[in-house]
Image (tube, rainbow, N blue to C red):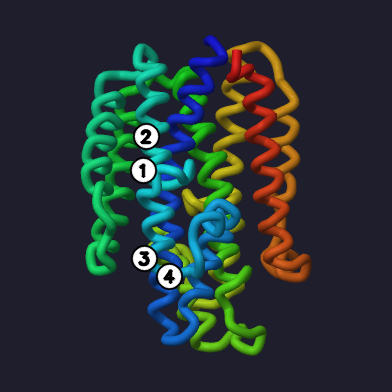
Amino acid sequence: MLGKTAGGLYWMFRSLERAENTARLIEAGFRIALTRSTDTASEWRSVIVTSAAQAAYEANHDGYDSGQVVNFLLRDKTNPSSVYSVFKSARDNARLVRTALTTEVWSAINETWMLLADLLKRPIKETDLPDLLATIRQQSALVRGALHGTMLRNDIYDFCRIGTFVERMDNTARIVDVKYYALLPSPSYVGSRMDNVQWETILRSVSAHRSYRWATDDEFSAGSIANFLILDRRMPRSLSFCCSQVSSNLGYLAEEYGGRMACHDKADALMARLKDRDIDSIFEEGLHEFLTSVISDTASLGQQIEQDYRFNN
């Protein structure tokens, strides 16, 4: 496969996943802000910081008003990571690799782009925000469903899946980090009712509330929920699950192309960091420090994949 085609597939599905996870990150901030009656600006600032968009945001905005933050992350055309921008990028990449996609996948992404471009024409009212975020998640799932149901399990499919799970791993780490990086008002709140309510909110924001109830008998607590979202390989948005999927699909590419590359070693090293760990050791290391290092290692892995498979050629 041409590197340019592989890159188009990879970035198409990274962009789709980024749009969905930006919506989830906004929902996390929105829900947590509702649990506190004062200083909501700090919650929205933490959402911007966690999305790695602080410099771009502060270049054009003063303060962290909810309306400004939501507008910036959802529909600002000058923000390359806004939902509008990344859906446009996904559709542009889909056009680039149109001949590698089934009709169903192309139709799903094209129709999604047209729907969301229309919905994001106007500023979003706070009362309309939950429905819009749900629509973004549903449309992303529609495209993934078309991929699963109609595409051959070959290198095309592998690059799509690698893009999905590299992005999801990065974003799950960021969504969990939004809890500990800036939202908790004081260390004295750890283990309190407020702390546990905020962790429950994070679960709901990654559509894991019911799954958590099915998977564990534990009550909502920082340790148990962090363990579920970081180490539980049954959970399709956990760091361990995402890393295992990236490693698996890279393995299929190694078989198909007849050799391993540097990105395979990076994926294995990241998998080793998550394998046979327990959440207590991660908390001792420092949850924020651990998540920051995972985000850095995931970025490095993504860059290595681009280099090894010559996406720019």
Query: Is there a contact, CB below 8 Å, between mark 3 and mark 4?
Result: yes
Give the Cα separation between the discs numbered 3 and 2: 22 Å
Q: Secondary structure at mark 2?
A: helix
Q: Find disc 1 in the rendering and name its residue.
A: 84
Question: Residue 139 in the image: x percent, y percent?
Answer: 28, 43
Q: Are dots 2 and 1 in contact, CB under 8 Å?
A: yes
Residue 186 sits above or below residue 308 on the image: below
Q: Amino acid at mark 4?
A: Asp
Q: Quadrant of the C terminus?
A: top right
Q: Which residue is mark 2?
A: 88
Q: Residue at x 30, y 19 (%)?
A: 102
Kind of residue at badge 1: Tyr
Please say if the residues under marks 4 and 2 sit with CB atoms less than 8 Å apart: no
The residue beneath circle 4 is: 65
Label 3 and label 4: CA atoms lie apart by 6 Å
In the displayed structure, 25 sits above or below 150; it is below
Q: Which residue is mark 3?
A: 67
- Point out the tag, 3 or 1, that comes first from the N-terminus: 3
Observer-nearest of 76 and 27: 76
